[in-house]
Image (cartoon, grey):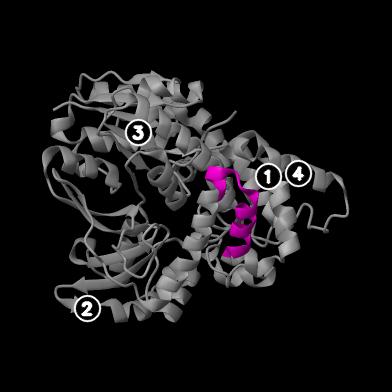
Amino acid sequence: MSFKIAFIGAGSIGFTRGLLRDMLSVPEFNNIEVAFTDINSHNLDMVTELCQRDIRENGLDITIQSSTDRRAALKDAKYVICTIRVGGLEAFATDVDIPLKYGVDQCVGDTLCAGGIMYGQRGIHEMLNICKDIREVAAEDVLLLNYANPMAMLTWACNKYGGVKTVGLCHGVQGGHSQIAEVFGLDKKEVDIICAGINHQTWYVQIGHKGEDLTGKLLEAFENHADFSRTEKVRIDMLRRFGYYSTESNGHLSEYVPWYRKRPNEIEEWIDLGNWINGETGGYLRVCTEGRHWFETEFPNWMKDSPHAYKQEERSEEHGSYIIEGLETGRVYRGHFNMVNNGIISNLPDDAIIEAPGYVDRNGIAMPVVGDLPLGPAAVCNVSISVQRLAVEAAVHGDDQLLRQAFMMDPLVGAVCNPKEIWQMVDEMLVAQEAWLPQYGKAIAESKGRLAAGNLIPTKEGYQGAARLKVKTVEEMQQDRDAANKNAGESDKGKDRAKAK
């Protein structure tokens, strides 16, 4: 069995290496073609060298086709895995720092809120270029597996405007599933779930164990858990008030809704600084920055460490390899996938990208009808979908009026800022990200004029947020290599490769 798989954004070392291990752990895939492409030739060379070493040590005769020429990598590819971060850390910093001047305190800023909306503007423009290349040079029946954020916005744009069948993939459902099993003291394999909603706001609407419905017992179980009662306060409060647990981490979820990060003096009540993902201001930006620095330092040690073993028991829970395995071998796989709704969740819009249970085999990807979400969770999702729709249309058409409306409709931005502040914030963000937003040429020129004219609303220049930690130096990270490697992995979940101009 042979086919070609191409990785776009392959310089993402931990994620690319892990996904390749997952793929090549499938016995039938021991002679597939593999192509890597990234705009950073140095990182691409290092990742290729490390992955090629893994392949060689596992006794496979596969030579990675590694190139900064994206079209060459995509040539005849049947599957494409995308893990780009458009604008890299330079743009990411403005996603976090400019909104802070206006009091919008984000932990991540890659899915919704001010940072996620602007990340989507950069990403959608480039994803449509990628789709054009895929249409022109990849295999006719190509499938794009998108791991890049903002997941829903990018997947929405690719399906509606890109002309390429695209499935969005995330590991949030698996992570929450593990937590649920832990609070009940059960093995994860014994706990059955139905989880549905939108990416990063997917809800465990049914939890069962050996015929017993545990859904109504979940709040008490989380409240009594020694760690989660401290680190997941936002998620537990949402469970308390909406009746269902949400997939995403405390830090992520806190910036998608209007209630937990709008007053600086209250933010620390809801977060924990033991790990960035629990709500630290700009936490994901910090670990991504540390991870980039650590990449160069640690690479020689990774080359000395034992290679990844291509064994079934070593595969991760990432959906990508299992989807391809199902399509190619016919083995049935059940997972949670991001797809165009089209009636799967009946009280969410048909054009939205939803995340819901699906099944894969040789016949394709099948998404059973979920029906209605509970009214409260559906309401939370529908607010976010409105923001996503505005942001997608803004990015595709370069319409800054729609972009500003997306900011106004965003739950946290709207809770913190008034319309005049939002207009000025968008001006600042457009100008700061000009290099990655060619579709906004006219709007950026107008924004520059307004900012230069003066009479600006005062902002909190230099404000670092309610709970920001400093970026560690390489020397500080070397003092605890294990922790540094863990953070590097956190920063490398397929979302930290740049698309610079």
Q: Disc 2 vs disc 3: Cβ atoms closer than 8 Å?
A: no
Q: Which residue is mark 3?
A: 17
308 horizontally vs 236: left or right: left
Residue shown at 67% from the left, 37% from the top: 441
Question: Is residue 304 visible to us here?
Answer: no
Q: What residue span does the magenta drawing correspond to?
A: 394-410
Quadrant where the image shows the N terminus: top left
27 horizontally vs 161: left or right: left
Q: Disc 1 vs disc 2: Cβ atoms closer than 8 Å?
A: no
Q: Which residue is mark 4?
A: 446
SS of the residue under disc 2: strand
Amino acid carrying label 4: it is Glu
Residue 213's mark?
A: 2
Amino acid carrying label 2: it is Asp
* CA gap, disc 2 and disc 3: 39 Å
Residue 268: image location, x then y, percent: 61, 68
Residue 231: image location, x then y, percent: 48, 66
Task: Please tell me which of labels 1 and 2 falls first in the chain.
Answer: 2
